[in-house]
Amino acid sequence: MTEPVSRATVEAFYSAYTSRDPHRIGAMLDDAVEWHVTGPCEAISVCGVWRGKDAVIERFTKVVPQILTVKGIRIDHLLVDGDSSAMFGRITSLLHATDRVIAHGFAQIARYRNGKVVYFSVINDSFDAAEQFLGHRLNLHETPALAESAFVVAV
């Protein structure tokens, strides 16, 4: 049976997360944390999967700062239930390659064990974010149709 996480622990994690301080964030992570940032990695190069506290801290100290600077994170909703939390908000960043401001909505799901984040998943409004990262609107009418064999349904 999982142990419920306190709202105070969740708020402490988000305080560390919004600070962008890797030491504060690292203090809130389980050694075996799984960190997922969804989105098209080809267009949004900060997306991907990181496993383990050291890999997540490296993401905050090396990977992200090379690509962008987070200017602000707005938390619109923060829910806590059992051993998990959900956050809905908006992030604003400066993309270094173009000096363009990127702002888009996102949701986050976190699971906690012994007061530490053991699983974290960011669900970006990736279509909006990809257009901003690329610097132009995506024309879906020019996108080649996928073959029927590209879709797999698990039963």
Image: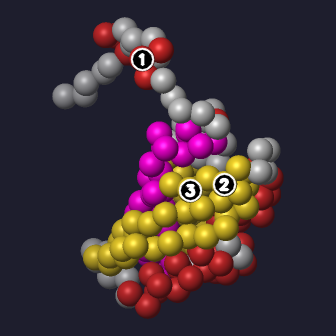
User: Which one is earlier in the sequence, the residue at label 1 or at label 2?
Assistant: 2
What amino acid is labelled 2 in the image? Val
The C terminus, quarter of image = top left
Query: Image check: 49 left or right of 67?
Result: left
What amino acid is labelled 1 in the image? His
The Cα atoms of the two marked residues, 2 and 3, are separated by 7 Å
State the image coordinates of residue 101 (x, y, percent, origin top left): 66, 54
Residue annotated with mark 2: 101
Image quadrant of residue 71?
A: bottom right
Magenta span main SS: strand
Residue nearest the viewer, comparing 145 with 148 = 145
Label 2: which secondary element: strand
The Cα atoms of the two marked residues, 3 and 1, are separated by 25 Å
Contact flag, marks 2 and 3 (Cβ < 8 Å) = yes
Label 3: which secondary element: strand
Residue nearest the viewer, comparing 148 with 143 = 143
The N terminus, quarter of image = bottom left
Numbered label attached to residue 141 = 1
